[in-house]
Image (cartoon, grey):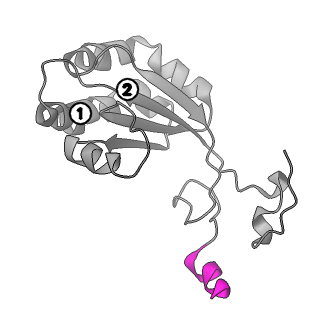
Amino acid sequence: MEEPHSVTFGRLASPASANRQPYLKITFFLIKKSGLSDQEFHSHWETVHADLTVAAKGFREIQALRYVQFHQTPEIRAAAEGLGYPVLPYDGCTEIYVKRLEDWKTFSSSPAFSRALGGDAAKFLESNVFIMAGYENIIFGKAIDGLGGTDGLLPEDLKALA
């Protein structure tokens, strides 16, 4: 699929120069439980479920690097529909950053995980959770402090184009 292309930024010249970050990200695509209001879903997820997750014994043991919630409210979804692309039908995503996928598997299959999170998830989530797992290749922007990655292109790199 290689097409002749004269790159503007040498760092983007080949896959060998990719800016792969030194962690993996697991993204969980979530749908709120039928019968819950959007406010109930987002509030519970932001508070109760978040606290149960990071307080769980196994979460500390796997040394998770980062836990992020990505909320899509009805207002944001409606605005996103105006961008000209189909909008995914999820109410949110959880992003967990780990060094190895096996670490998350160890935690998520543990009795501590089941005790802390299994019953709670059933209160506010539909059971059909999908995931993606992979690495980040930062093209533009700063790396996340403390995770050992490297920055992508930065605003000052773009000034040369003016």
Does 40 sit left or right of 106 as displayed?
A: left
Counting the numbered discs, the total is: 2
Q: Quadrant of residue 157?
A: bottom right
Kindly identify the amino acid type of the residue bearing the numbered disc 1: Trp
Residue that numbered label 1 is attached to:
45
- Is 147 drawn above or below residue 124 in the view shown? below
Mark closer to the chain start, 2 or 1: 1
Spatial distance from mark 2 to mark 1, Cα to Cα? 19 Å
Does 112 sit left or right of 4 as displayed?
A: left
Most common SS among magenta residues: helix
Point out the image quarter for the C terminus. bottom right
Please provide percent x and percent y for residue 18: 75, 55
- Is 9 drawn above or below residue 150 in the view shown? below
**Foreground residue among 135 and 117:** 135
Q: Quadrant of residue 57?
A: top left
Q: Residue at x 12, y 31 (%)?
A: 40
Please identify, in this view, whether the residue under mark 2 or under mark 1 is nearer the observer.
Answer: 1
- Is 40 drawn above or below residue 34 in the view shown? below
**Foreground residue among 83 and 56:** 83
Point out the image quarter for the N terminus. top right
Residue 25 within the segment the image draws in magenta: no
Q: Residue at x 11, y 29 (%)?
A: 37
Please provide percent x and percent y for residue 159: 61, 85
Query: Can you tell which mark lies on residue 144?
Result: none
**Foreground residue among 80 and 30:** 80
Does 162 sit left or right of 92 as displayed?
A: right
Looking at the rendering, the stretch of residues picked out in magenta corresponds to: 154-162
Task: State the SS at label 1.
Answer: helix
Q: Residue at x 23, y 42 (%)?
A: 73
Residue that numbered label 2 is attached to:
57
Task: State the SS at label 2.
Answer: helix
